[in-house]
Amino acid sequence: MSRVYGWMFAGLMLTGVTALYTVSNEALLNQVLQWRMGLLLAELGVVLALSFLAPRLSGPVAAALFLGYSALTGMTLSIYFLIYTAGSIGQALLLTGGVFGALSLYGTLTKKDLSAWAAFLFMGLVGVLLAGVANIFIRSEGMSFVTACACVIVFAGLTAYDTQKLRQMHAATGYSSAATISVVGALTLYLDFINLFLALLRLFGRRR
C-alpha cells in the first residue's frame, strides 16, 4: 500500500501545482474557462481507460495516464481559486487530509468486512451524481447543500471501503505488473480525496 499512497500523493501534488500555475497564468486560465467541458470529457476518458484497460496496461503507461489525469484535474480545479478564498481552500484541504487519513486508517485496521457497504455506497454515489446534474438546471442552494452533505458521507465511506478493497486487490492476479495495480489503486483513493475535498469546500468554503 505504500506505493499506492506514494502515487496518490504524487498525483495530488501535481494537481495542486497545476492548479496554482493555471490560476496565475491569465492566458492559460482563459483557455481553461473556454474549454472546461472538453477538459472534463478528457478526464472522464482517462478514468475510463484506466478503469477498464488496467489489466492490460504496463506500469509506465498506467502511470503516464494517471499523471496526465492529475494535471487535467489541476486545470479544471483552478477555477475554485476564483470562487473561494485561498484561506478557506487551505482549511478545506487540511480538513480533508484529516478525515481521509482517519478513514483510510480505519479501512486498513478494521477486522470488519466492509464489502457489505458496497450497495449502499453505489446507490449513494448514483444519487449524488443525479442530484448534481439536476441542480445544474434547478440551481437550488438547498439542494446544493444537501448534495454536498451526501457527498461527504458517500466519499468518506468509499475511502474506508476502497482502502480495504485495495489491500485485498494486491493479492489478485490478472494485472500486467504490480506497478499497474499501485497506480490504479492510487487513482481510486485520489478520486475519493478530491471529491471529499470539493464537498467540504462547498460546505465550509468562504466565497470571494
Image (tube, helix red, strand yellow):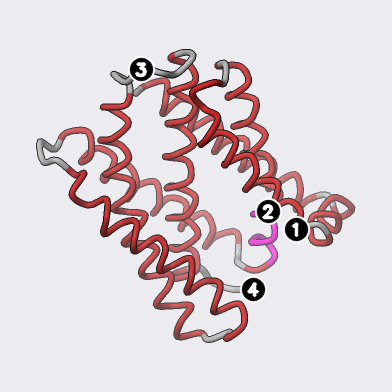
Q: Residue furthest left?
A: 111
Quarter of the rendering occupied by the N terminus: top left
Q: Amino acid at mark 2?
A: Leu
Q: Is residue 147 left or right of residue 105?
A: right
Residue at (37%, 70%) from the top-left corner?
149
Which residue was labeled with disc 3? 173
Q: CA distance from mark 3 to mark 1?
A: 38 Å
Residue at (61%, 77%) from the top-left corner?
136
Quarter of the rendering occupied by the C terminus: bottom right
Q: Amino acid at mark 4?
A: Arg
Q: On residue 208, which mark appears?
A: 4
Q: Which of disc 4 and disc 1 is earlier in sequence?
A: 1
Which residue was labeled with disc 2? 40
Q: Is residue 146 left or right of residue 17?
A: left
CB-based contact (under 8 Å), mark 2 and mark 1: yes
Q: Which marked residue is nearer to the observer: mark 3 or mark 1?
A: 3
Q: Which of disc 2 and disc 3 is earlier in sequence?
A: 2
Q: On residue 36, which mark appears?
A: 1
Q: CA distance from mark 1 to mark 4?
A: 21 Å
